[in-house]
Image (cartoon, grey):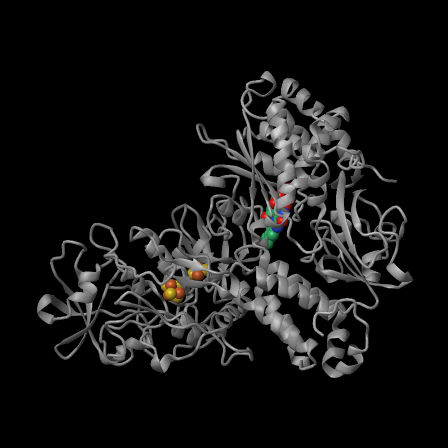
Amino acid sequence: MPKITIDDIPIEVPEGTTILQAARMIGGDIVPPAMCYYSKLKTSGGYCRTCIVKVEQGSEKDPRPMPKPVASCRTNVMDGMVVRNITSQENLEARAGVVEFLLMNHPLDCPVCDQAGECHLQDLSYEHGKEGTRNEFERREYEPMDFGDTIKLNMNRCILCYRCVKVADQLTDGRCHGVINRGEHAEISTYIEKAIDNDFSGNMIDVCPVGALTDRTFRFKSRVWYTNPVDAHRDCDKCCGKVRLWNQGDEVLRVTARKDQFGEVIDNEDGSTAWICNDCRFEKKHLNDWVIEGPSDISRHSVISANHYESLRSIQKTTMKMMGAKPHGVKFELGDGALDPNNQ
Amino acid sequence: MSKKLLLKNDHIPGINTLATYKENGGYAVLTNALKNLSPDAIVEEVKKSGLRGRGGAGFPTGMKWSFLAKPEGVPRYLVCNADESEPGTFKDRYLMERIPHLLVEGMILSSFALGANTSYIYIRGEYFYVANILEKAIDEAYQAGYLGKNILGTGFNLDLYVQVGAGAYICGEETALLESLEGKRGNPRIKPPFPAVAGLYGCPTVVNNVETIAAVVPIIEMGGEEYAKIGIGKSTGTKLISASGHINKPGVYEIELGLPVEEFIYSEEWCGGIRGGRKMKAVVAGGSSVPILPTELILKTVNGEPRLMSYESLGDGGFISGTMLGSGGFIVMDEETSIVKNLYTFSRFYHHESCGQCSPCREGIGWMERILEKILDGRGTLADIDLLWDIQSKIEGKTICPLGEAAAWPVAAAIRHFRPEFEAYVTNPDSIKDIKHYYRLKN
Ligand SMILES: Cc1cc2nc3c(=O)[nH]c(=O)nc-3n(C[C@H](O)[C@H](O)[C@H](O)COP(=O)(O)O)c2cc1C
Ligand code: SF4
Ligand code: FES
């Protein structure tokens, strides 16, 4: 098995593991942020470049000259690799550059965005970005678009991570969702605003890391931090029926799949991904549709967790020492706690 | 002195037809090779020749061919990259237009060497008339038994197709090309896997430039060792250079690698000197993406040695004082050229051509273009110059494919070597407006 070090921490992982996966096995703050990679979606990753790391020393088997910045989500480990993430100032600088690019055309409309509080772009900019932007030119703008009755696309917020395209490709049949136009003008489209009426199309909302794809049935109902997430299930003949309800009092405001600390939909016991169907997501909005299991364990360090979840675990500050006590930029100081990726 | 291997017959009337091409020795190399050489022997000759890819990166062709995976029962493909869209590069067009059979012969020979039974020439959409010329040549080759089943009775089968692109520079990047060839959106793939392992339709594939494939014919004709004697050091053989800009004789030239740059620019045999007797200001030596060099650095290296037309000599000094041979798109600029305006044109091109998959390229190039426009407009600040520098450094090396670098390098080089000119645009815009620039982008 290849042996590598990431930020001076040694780890041995199976052949074919990516640098990002290896870092996730170590856990803590040396895990590169991933905005487009999604382990449950084939061929995802490689687009956003936020997971960039510096391969300081390659493997003897690899003839390519090093050091070299690579996308950790799409680069497999090779024996002897020396990888630097947060112990390389140069790498942090490069990532800050990527964050600046991602925010350049972003409308920064968090106050009116349903994703606020659980948005990966918010987290990313707090943790890895710099204050302000140096862009003085007009931002590009698109008209919001409805994908059928249930999904709203706000292209201004999209970071073109391609996750929703992969969902359309891999989870639904009769794909009619993709990217049109090129370069800066590239946009997500259903090709002529064709409604996506497919049992699993709602999962696009769950994979979208930003507020570009949101649930029309939840639109403007509440802020996520005022809701109370509980895990629940029902017998469903289309999907696993295991969901997370976002409640206010007795009212179910929103239904989503259950997600892990990286924002990815969790696995079922049989190893399949616990995607949920549109019936469960959009039609079952009464508490008596569901068997409640108990409060959800929110393990992401994002704003949603800020006020009231006791089981909250924040990221482990593995290498604070090495970085000369570089403060982690999380907006809300969440307290220390060990994070065990296997303990969901 | 000129040594011609590819263009030795380009002046012969009718050389685009099979009959004339054959009268002048065409298809003799192929006929001989198919009957007397094994595929491996051909690969071996190409390795010995030291031939390097003529599409821009200069990767050793023999080595690329030997990387080709050969799993049982899986087809292999050879794809010729005729997308030629880099500003300043127009050598492949000339070759295909004049001597289409040389490329066809090279394709058959190379396909045989690689064990490919289906091969493609992917040509840019704007070259539709060249595609017609190639189609005609391919038809003739089928009729003469050089293509199709059981070629020349050797049992080797090959079908050769021409596929026309739809006008995207990015489709010249080999994996975007393969996507496009498969009928998909021309987005570069994330590597690995490399095409040699999983290329067209997931099968092992070699992608080579037009000139690279054409060069296989003279290599097999004279033998790899003889070919390697031409040129200088690791820059073996001849190279097509498309010379343009403020020179007396723009055009496509075949040169022996190692020719001094100064001789290439000023000799009557080649570019014939600077137009109107003006002074030369700068040269972009290998297509718009390679670093621009001012006159003193393009003629001599920092060590005072004469700069030669070769991969090594042009690269001498790295990007601090050197550049690249690239695709051979040689653009000469005289003293009246505005480097900033020229750079703006390049940035506008790359901005337009970005596929939009990865964020640094998608967002960064348009940003650089806007800043350059602002500077040209007289609204720039000195901080904008530093910002440009910073943006290019955040694109370079951080993108899926080298289009990011192609856009970043020209910006870096222009600032590195011509910073005072940028500053003049900012601090004293009127003084700059007085120069009669050759390029007038705005009236
Ligand atoms: C944006 C971009 C555009 C390219 N355009 C071309 C092209 O038009 N023609 C070409 O031969 N190679 C082009 N290349 C290089 C190809 O990816 C590839 O390296 C080349 O076709 C390999 O052939 P060679 O080894 O014979 O040079 C381009 C690369 C990039 C990144
Ligand atoms: S809409 Fe969301 S999921 Fe789809 S590409 Fe944009 S950011 Fe990614
Ligand atoms: S997460 Fe790796 S490139 Fe986006």
Asked if B300 appears above or below B235 in the picture, the reply is: below
Q: Nearer the viewer, residue A264 or A159?
A: A159
Report the image quarter containing ligand 3: bottom left
Left or right position of B297 against B345: right
| Residue B373 visible from this viewpoint | yes
Asked if B204 appears above or below A333 in the picture, the reply is: above
Left or right position of B238 against B203: right
Quadrant in the rendering for residue A164:
bottom left
Q: Nearer the viewer, residue B320 or B196?
A: B196
What residue is shown at x 83% (from left), y 37% (from top)? Answer: B3
The quadrant of the image that shows the C terminus of chain B is bottom right
The quadrant of the image that shows the N terminus of chain B is top right
Question: Percent from the top left, x then y, of residue A31?
Answer: 40, 63
Asked if A288 appears above or below A168 in the picture, the reply is: below
Quadrant in the rendering for residue B120:
top right
Question: Percent from the top left, x then y, of residue A214?
Answer: 31, 70
Q: Nearer the viewer, residue B267 or B252?
A: B252
Quadrant in the rendering for residue B116:
top right
What residue is shown at x 58% (from left), y 66% (from top)? Answer: B365
Count every numbered label the image shows and give the total.
Answer: 0
Question: Percent from the top left, x then y, of residue A22?
Answer: 40, 55
| Residue A59 visible from this viewpoint | no
Spot the residue most to the left: A288
Left or right position of B64 against B433: left
What residue is shown at x 24% (from left), y 51% (from top)? Answer: A272
Q: Nearer the viewer, residue B198 or A307?
A: B198
